[in-house]
């Protein structure tokens, strides 16, 4: 099975712009979660989508949003970029069956740099 | 999700066995223990998961004592490529909380 893919791998934007990141989960997985990783804060949960619905949300401002399509592919959007949004954005997919053994599989990430 | 405590860093040499211990005193009855490995600028990679006693796969073993208040990830004969951050996660999954909370992890440095 192909793994989780994320595009683009690297992105450079300037303050005030917006950005859209894409994630394709493992075939058959219905849950897609997004995480932000920075040296200072570590890995932080952004949100999770399951069957095109946001099922859970982390503690991030409304500038961070996402969506999931019927084929389980997901996008996340960050509007009005700030310098502090520079981070590695990770997408993880899982079957989403809410079982205790449900394992999340991560993509390689998108490195966003805000200048 | 249960809070976990791991050493911040560990050093080892190639060919040695490495054991990384994680404490999770308030683990719940239905919680599983999962370990991830992360290399710089890459996503975390699932290593192993267990509930009790011992689990072994092709890359690692996981030892969980009867009280389940701690767990030990064992990496046999490490190589330079095992240098990475290792995260211990404890938590159940349900429809409302399908998220992972990562702690600071353990930076394992393998030297030649």
Image (tube, helix red, strand yellow):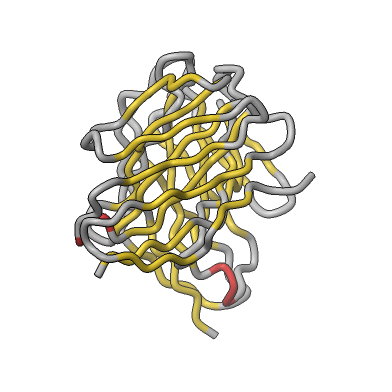
Q: Residue at x 38, y 52 (%)?
A: A19
For residue A82, above or below residue B108: above
Left/right placement of residue B80 relative to residue A55 reads right
Quadrant housing the C terminus of chain A: bottom left
> Of residues A58 and B100, which is closer to you in this image?
A58
Left/right placement of residue A102 relative to residue B31 reads right
For residue A49, above or below residue B16: above
Q: Quadrant of residue B22?
A: top left
For residue B67, above or below residue B22: above
Q: Residue furthest front?
A: A17
**Horizontal and vertical percent for residue A52?**
54, 22
Q: Quadrant of residue A1?
A: top right
Q: Residue at x 67, y 30 (%)?
A: A71
**Horizontal and vertical percent for residue A97?**
61, 18
**Horizontal and vertical percent for residue A107?**
57, 51
Q: Quadrant of residue B11?
A: bottom left
Left/right placement of residue B107 relative to residue B30 reads left
> Of residues B22 and A70, which is closer to you in this image?
A70
Count of labels in the image: 0
For residue A92, above or below residue B11: above
Q: Residue at x 53, y 41 (%)?
A: A92
**Horizontal and vertical percent for residue B6?**
34, 49
Q: Residue at x 39, y 32 (%)?
A: A47
């Amino acid at each position: 099975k192909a793994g989780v893919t994320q595009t683009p791998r690297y992105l450079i934007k300037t303050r005030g712009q917006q950005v859209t990141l894409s994630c394709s989960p493992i075939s058959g997985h219905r849950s897609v979660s997004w995480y932000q990783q920075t040296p200072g804060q570590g890995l932080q949960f952004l949100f999770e989508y399951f069957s095109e619905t946001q099922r859970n949300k982390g503690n991030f401002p409304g500038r961070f949003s996402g969506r999931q399509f019927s084929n389980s592919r997901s996008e996340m959007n960050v509007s009005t970029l700030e310098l502090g949004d520079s981070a590695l954005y990770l997408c993880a997919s899982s079957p989403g069956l809410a079982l205790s053994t449900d394992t999340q599989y991560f993509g390689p990430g998108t490195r966003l740099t805000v200048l | 999700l249960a809070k976990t405590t791991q050493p911040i860093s560990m050093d080892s040499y190639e060919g040695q066995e490495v054991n990384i211990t994680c404490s999770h005193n308030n683990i719940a009855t239905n919680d599983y223990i999962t370990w991830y490995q992360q290399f710089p600028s890459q996503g975390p990679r699932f290593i192993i998961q267990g509930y009790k006693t011992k689990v072994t796969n092709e890359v690692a073993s996981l030892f969980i004592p009867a009280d389940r208040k701690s767990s030990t990830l064992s990496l046999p004969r490490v190589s330079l490529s095992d240098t990475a951050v290792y995260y211990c996660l404890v938590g159940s999954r349900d429809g409302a909380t399908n998220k992972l909370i990562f702690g600071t992890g353990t930076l394992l440095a393998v030297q030649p």
